[in-house]
Image: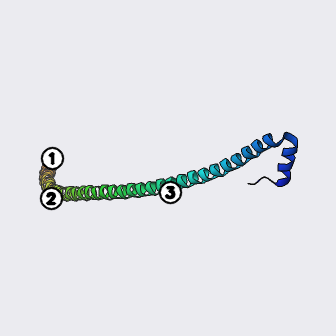
Amino acid sequence: MPIPAQLSRKIHETFGDEAAEAMVDWMEQADARRAELRELNELSTARFESRLREGITTLRMETQADIAELRQEMHTEFADVRQEMHAGFARCDTQMAELRGALGEFRQEMRANLAEFDAKVAHRFAALMKWSFVFWVGSAVTLVAAQAALAKFWR
């Protein structure tokens, strides 16, 4: 930035020609350095932004790769879980079939045992009826004989 003529004249009057020239040179150098610093700052900012964009791009690519890898792992794990579930369901179906078979065998056994029990109960009932008949016949014969004996006795 150039020094205004009025300021330059005022510096010459105040400090003298030599000091004024030195001061003007110093101010021009400071102004030039400021421009250089501004350029360096802009270059540094541009370089930083470029690196930042590269970093963001790299991070996005790595993140996408990580997500893709995670998805693949999840698909693999879910496939494994599905296979284990199907195997477990197959085992459950097999065990249920075995239980149904065992239950069928148990029912047949129970039917056979109930039939045997019914036969035994019928046999015991028949035996009880036979002995009951023998008891009643024996009692009736005894009563008839007692009555006949009493009738003879009272005659």
Residue 24 coordinates in the image, percent (x, y): 76, 46
**Mark 3, secondary structure of its residue:** helix
Residue type at tag 1: Ala
**Mark 2, secondary structure of its residue:** helix
Q: Give the labeled residue for mark 2.
A: 108
Q: CA distance from mark 2 to mark 3?
A: 80 Å
Give whichever of 86, 4 is nearer the camera.
Answer: 4
| Label 3: how many Cα within 10 Å (few below 14, some 14–19, many 20+) | few
Q: Is residue 46 above or below residue 29?
A: below
Foreground tag (2 vs 1):
2
Q: Which mark is residue 45?
A: none
Residue 43 coordinates in the image, percent (x, y): 57, 53
Residue 27 coordinates in the image, percent (x, y): 74, 46
Q: Give the labeled residue for mark 1.
A: 146
Q: Are marks 2 and 3 in contact (CB under 8 Å)?
A: no
| Label 1: how many Cα within 10 Å (few below 14, some 14–19, many 20+) | few
Q: Give the labeled residue for mark 3.
A: 53
Sequence order check, earlier mark of 2 and 1 = 2
Sequence order check, earlier mark of 3 and 1 = 3
Image quadrant in which you'd find residue 100: bottom left
Q: CA distance from mark 2 to mark 1?
A: 56 Å
Query: Residue placed at 79% from the left, 41% from the top?
Result: 18
Give whichever of 45, 74 is nearer the camera.
Answer: 45
The extreme front residue here reads 17
Image quadrant in which you'd find residue 96: bottom left
Residue type at tag 2: Gln
Image quadrant in which you'd find residue 87: bottom left
Q: CA distance from mark 3 to mark 1?
A: 131 Å
> Which quarter of the figure is the N terminus placed in?
bottom right
